[in-house]
Image (cartoon, grey):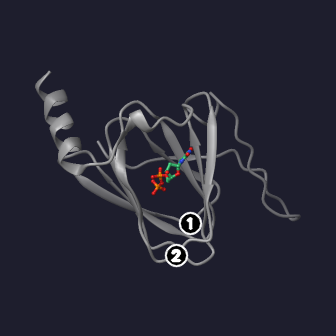
């Protein structure tokens, strides 16, 4: 099964412009407790972590960026450049974001409030956790 899960967001664009409406537990498969956005990006990549429980949907509102998703055995990548599509990232997945366009605005919807305890920021620790889960 692909690591790349894209959802089409409800889009109501017309000749006046684009409009996307997002509702918790509707197009987004969880209750949104937090959102954050990344902007004024540089050539520096971001992410380089996994989460234990958090579910997220990333939507590139403007510009583009490249996501790499890694479940410990497979890596897949996708370039987000469409504000009507969301990338669902859930489960034990290492994520990296690269190649931000100068104008990139990346919105992320999250299922939980911020908790540093939910982060795995060390790749070896991530792989150890994947192996323990596979052996359970
Ligand atoms: P981080 O998640 O490491 O950024 P990225 O994965 O995009 O590289 O977050 C960067 C900093 O911002 C870190 O000190 C934690 C803080 N932060 C919050 O306080 N709340 C949040 O909701 C997020 C996403 C980050």
Q: Are marks 1 and 2 in contact (CB under 8 Å)?
A: no
Query: Few, some or many C-alpha atoms within 10 Å of disc 2 (few <14, some 14-19, many ≥20)?
Result: some
**Quarter of the figure with the C terminus:** top left
Examine the rendered structure and indicate whether residue 117 appears above or below residue 71.
above
Badge 1 element: loop
Examine the rendered structure and indicate whether residue 76 appears above or below residue 71.
below
Q: Is residue 33 left or right of residue 72?
A: right
Residue that sits furthest to the top in the current view: 136
Where is residue 14 shown, x and y percent of the image? Answer: 83, 59
Residue that sits furthest to the left in the current view: 135
Mark number displayed over residue 42:
2
> Is residue 14 visible to us here?
yes
Examine the rendered structure and indicate whether residue 70 appears above or below residue 120.
below
Residue 103, picture quadrant: bottom right
Residue in the image at 23% along x and 42% along y: 126
Where is residue 77 shown, x and y percent of the image? Answer: 35, 60
Mark number displayed over residue 81:
1
Residue in the image at 26% along x and 45% along y: 71
Mark number displayed over residue 8:
none
Q: Earlier in the sequence, mark 1 or mark 2?
A: 2
- Please name whichever residue, 116 or 46, is drawn nearer the observer in this view of the structure: 116
Mark 1 vs mark 2: give the one in front.
Answer: 2
- Please name whichever residue, 103 or 24, is drawn nearer the observer in this view of the structure: 103
- Please name whichever residue, 122 or 87, is drawn nearer the observer in this view of the structure: 122
Where is residue 54 shown, x and y percent of the image? Answer: 45, 34
Badge 2 element: loop
Query: Few, some or many C-alpha atoms within 10 Å of disc 1 (few <14, some 14-19, many ≥20)?
Result: many
């Amino acid at each position: 099964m692909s690591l790349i899960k894209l959802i089409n967001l409800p889009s109501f664009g017309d000749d006046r412009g684009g409009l996307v409406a997002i509702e918790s537990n509707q197009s987004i498969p969880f209750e949104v407790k937090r959102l954050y956005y990344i902007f004024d990006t540089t050539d520096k990549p971001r992410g380089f972590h996994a989460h234990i429980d958090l579910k997220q949907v990333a939507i590139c509102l403007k510009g583009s960026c490249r996501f790499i998703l890694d479940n410990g055995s497979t890596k897949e990548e996708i370039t987000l450049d469409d504000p009507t599509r969301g990338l669902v990232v859930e489960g034990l997945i290492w994520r990296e974001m690269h190649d931000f366009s100068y104008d990139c605005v990346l919105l992320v919807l999250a299922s939980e409030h911020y908790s540093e305890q939910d982060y795995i920021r060390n790749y070896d620790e991530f792989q150890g956790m994947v192996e323990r889960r596979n052996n359970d």
